[in-house]
Image (tube, rainbow, N blue to C red):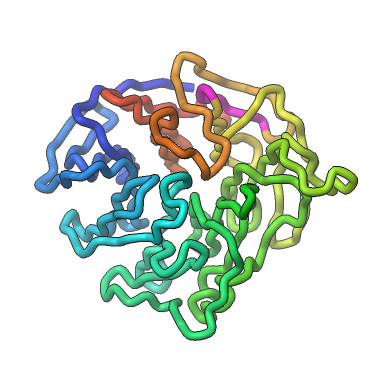
């Protein structure tokens, strides 16, 4: 892999935009050619995370273990966003953008910790907060939208605590918000699923922890394994035990994924082998949406288009690019 270090000043948030990195909270852009520019706006609060819509027009900056966020349009503040306080200090704020028919929505949990909702970013209307909503009791977190914007994945947890993933058809959920109350796609396994990442609009790579619901019936996915999972067909493809412990996975393609546990590495999904690594960079040891503190978990962002990873290393940004062939 290629490693590039970008020096930064007062770094708060990192977010990919037009293949450069933007700190929306501090109002600074960092181009990969070394150019640094100041934006007109910055925001004086302890925001530490940012996401952007597909067209780059909308940005949401927020505190990962807090309740407060700001929604921006073309760099200008539209409104404040809040989530319920319950357990907000221990797990990642659920937030993602989705665009359908040229209309952009912020997906988050403004009404209840267990209720996913779609908010029209232009009107502020929460279009899915309708009568008769009765969501399952789960904590949504680490939201991710599939490459073509078709599916939404929540990588959260249920009490006591146990990590899980759930996948929803975005278009169908907007038509019928009651579908958000019960997952449309989820792997039927008896192990804790601690990480997952979209490969395409049918397949994800998933990873299990050592948590087990029923030791007498492990099922199709054993503990501490990774595998390719076709969620539309509910098919598991050859679970593999990795050579080392893994954490958050980011799928580069159907054969390789970034693993960020301890230090950046690229895993062959088919064999579990580590095919590239850089053990000089600290990437934290996150293995769940529950982190309790951000002190030991640096912000990590993935550029799905280029396969690049960027890591917030306090006064610098480490940018990792996979070699050709991955």
Position in image of residue 158 (x %, y %): 61, 54
x and y, in percent, of residue 294 in the image: 40, 35
Query: From what the image shows, is residue 305 above or below residue 273?
Result: below
Q: Is residue 252 visible?
A: no
Q: Which residues are magenta?
A: 262-268
Which residue of the protein is positioned furthest toward the left in this rendering? 40
Q: Is residue 266 magenta?
A: yes
Q: Residue at x 76, y 34 (%)?
A: 240
Vertically, is 184 above or below 41?
below
**Front-most of residues 54 and 118:** 118
Q: Is residue 1 left or right of residue 196?
A: left
Count of marks overlaid on the render: 0
- Asked whether residue 66 appears in the rendered view, the answer is yes
Residue 211 falls in image quadrant: top right
Who's the residue at 41% across and 21% down the image?
3
Give the residue drawn at x 17%, y 47%.
Answer: 43
Q: Residue at x 23, y 45 (%)?
A: 24
Residue closer to the observer: 45 or 105: 45
Depth check: give the residue in front, 173 or 232.
Answer: 173
Kindly give the residue lying farthest to the right in the view shown: 216
Compared across the picture, whether 48 is left or right of 44 comes to right
- Residue 170, how many percent across, how many down? 52, 69
Instruction: Quadrant for residue 79, please give it.
Output: bottom left
Rendered location of residue 94, percent (x, y): 44, 55
The C terminus lies in which quarter of the figure?
A: top right
Q: Residue furthest bottom?
A: 131
Decide: is 80 above or below 295: below
The answer to if 112 sits in the magenta stretch is no
């Amino acid at each position: 892999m290629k490693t590039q270090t970008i020096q930064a000043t007062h770094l708060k948030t990192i977010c990919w935009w037009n293949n450069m990195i933007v700190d929306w909270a501090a109002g600074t852009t960092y181009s990969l050619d070394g150019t640094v520019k100041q934006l007109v706006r910055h925001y004086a609060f302890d925001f530490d995370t940012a996401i952007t819509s597909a067209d780059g027009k909308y940005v949401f900056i927020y505190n990962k273990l807090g309740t407060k966020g700001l929604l921006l349009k073309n760099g200008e503040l539209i409104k404040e966003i809040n989530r319920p306080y319950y357990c907000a200090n221990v797990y990642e704020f659920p937030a993602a953008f989705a665009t359908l028919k040229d209309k952009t929505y912020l997906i988050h949990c403004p009404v209840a910790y267990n209720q996913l909702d779609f908010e029209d970013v232009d009107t502020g209307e929460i279009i899915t907060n309708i009568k008769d909503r009765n969501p399952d009791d789960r904590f949504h977190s680490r939201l991710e939208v599939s490459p073509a914007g078709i599916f939404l994945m929540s990588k959260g947890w249920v009490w006591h605590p146990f990590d899980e993933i759930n996948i929803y058809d975005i278009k169908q959920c907007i038509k019928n918000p009651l579908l958000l109350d019960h997952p449309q796609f989820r792997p039927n396994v008896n192990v804790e699923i601690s990480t997952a990442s979209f490969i395409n609009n049918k397949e994800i790579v998933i990873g299990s922890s050592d948590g087990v619901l029923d030791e007498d019936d492990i099922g199709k996915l054993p503990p501490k394994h990774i595998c390719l999972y076709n969620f539309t067909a509910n098919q598991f493809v050859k679970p593999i035990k990795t050579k080392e412990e893994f954490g958050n996975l980011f799928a580069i393609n159907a054969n390789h994924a970034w693993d960020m546990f301890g230090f950046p590495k690229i895993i062959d999904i088919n064999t579990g082998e580590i095919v590239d690594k850089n053990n000089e960079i600290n990437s934290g040891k996150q293995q769940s949406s529950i982190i309790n503190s951000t002190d030991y978990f640096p912000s990590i962002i993935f550029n799905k288009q280029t396969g690049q990873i960027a890591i917030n290393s306090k006064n610098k940004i480490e940018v990792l690019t996979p070699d050709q062939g991955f």
